[in-house]
Image: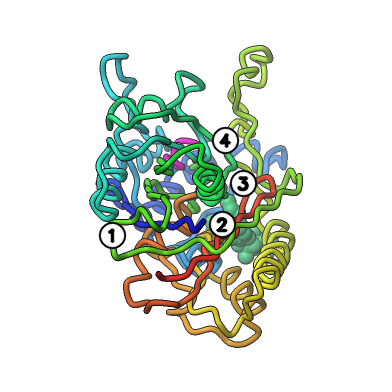
Amino acid sequence: MSVAITGTGLFTPPHSISNDDLVFSFNTWVDAENARNRDAIERGEIVALGRSSSEFVEKASGIQRRYVMDREGILDPKIMAPRIPERTQDEQSVQCEMAVAAAKKAFEAAKVTADDIDLVLVACSNMQRPYPAISVEVQAALGTRGFAFDMNVACSSATFGISTAKDMIAAGTVKRALVVSPEICTGHLNFRDRESHFIFGDACTAVVVERLDDARSDDRFEILGTKLVTRFSNAIRNDFGFLNRAAPEHRDEPNKLFVQQGRKVFKEVSPMVADLISGHLDSLGIGPSTIKRLWLHQANGTMNDWIAKKVLGREVAKEEAPSLLHEFGNTSSCGSIITFHAHRADLAKGDVGVVCSFGAGYSAGSVVVRKA
Ligand SMILES: CC(C)(COP(=O)(O)OP(=O)(O)OC[C@H]1O[C@@H](n2cnc3c(N)ncnc32)[C@H](O)[C@@H]1OP(=O)(O)O)[C@@H](O)C(=O)NCCC(=O)NCCS
């Protein structure tokens, strides 16, 4: 039985921050810290903090700006974190609100209503609470049927979610699924870490998955196969969790936010992803020359260029592996889905492409699709 993606939706947060704005805030904080510690720095007891630069950020990552849920708090050198007020139990949670906005757009694209959906998967890097599951709140807010659950595979959450939905539809467990990824990455980004303060932005993507035979939208992409891989690594890590209060002396340390060894990740994950996609295409009997598009995870432009060239075995035009890094930054699990959302309208019936995410875990997910 064929299963297809029949609609996607994107929620874009209301504010945007340029590299210059972000770097100005970071450097204001660095200068103040270095002035505060001047004597200790002069005595050699403390190493002065290094300043950041927009040129470095764009050259190293391809990022020019990013959308965020809150701009003021992030850019205030005294705060350097988003300010998102806690809501009461009677209000929708922030992630639920983002998910509902993206889901409604995906429903419209797929020509379905909430009543047609019997599985909601909230698949993203961080849930704002452990329970009740955000997905069950989204189910109630949208009025979908059946059941819902949350899943977290960091940056690979959305592709793992699509794979899970496809398998449950193929098995007859559910008829139609919504996979939604409300990523508030700025909530777990350390804006005082020079190595990574520029990396993330916020967004939410939504994907409708159903049997090809049930599809009402003309914009259908049959899922030819999914392949998932994980390999343990500490090179991208976040130690925030419910046991932090059991070791309160470490509760506010930087490892309770996103920490990565960017170079190591670059070197180790790139070949892992190229092997995953090539092996997956091989197992499906699809040659690289058939591939019309690669919708890759959005973490680093150079990394994606390398992966695309390795998979296709030739130089790759920008349009073949589109990037939205310049506008969105890294939006974790939303990245590959945002490019799929924005860069598929020109494909013709029969065209084949690969949606591929990769990130912490390590984890990587490949979803091979054909325009139906
Ligand atoms: C994070 C990343 C953009 C950093 O780029 P990079 O080229 O590896 O940069 P490095 O960390 O090696 O730093 C290079 C130099 O720039 C400096 N630098 C680091 N941050 C800087 C900043 N914000 N401003 C100016 N200079 C900076 C470093 O100190 C270093 O200087 P040195 O050569 O004098 O030692 C890149 O490694 C990356 O994107 N990796 C992959 C991440 C990924 O895929 N993650 C998975 C999903 S989350």
**Which portion, as a residue range, is magenta?**
184-190
Q: Amino acid at mark 2?
A: Ser
Q: Mark 1: which secondary structure?
A: loop
Label 4 vs 2, first from the N-terminus: 4
Q: Could you tell me which quadrant the C terminus lies in? A: bottom left
Label 3 vs 1, first from the N-terminus: 3
Residue 320: give x, y in percent of width and height. Answer: 47, 79
Residue at 30% in and 48% down: 11
Q: CA distance from mark 4 to mark 1?
A: 41 Å
- Residue of label 3: 48
Q: CA distance from mark 4 to mark 2?
A: 21 Å
- Residue of label 4: 257
Q: Mark 1 packing: few (<14 Cα in 10 Å), some, or many (20+)?
A: some
Residue at 43% in and 28% down: 147
Q: CA distance from mark 2 to mark 1?
A: 25 Å
Q: Mark 2 packing: few (<14 Cα in 10 Å), some, or many (20+)?
A: many
Q: Disc 3 or disc 1, which is closer to the eye?
A: 1
Asked whether 240 or 343 is in front, the reply is 343
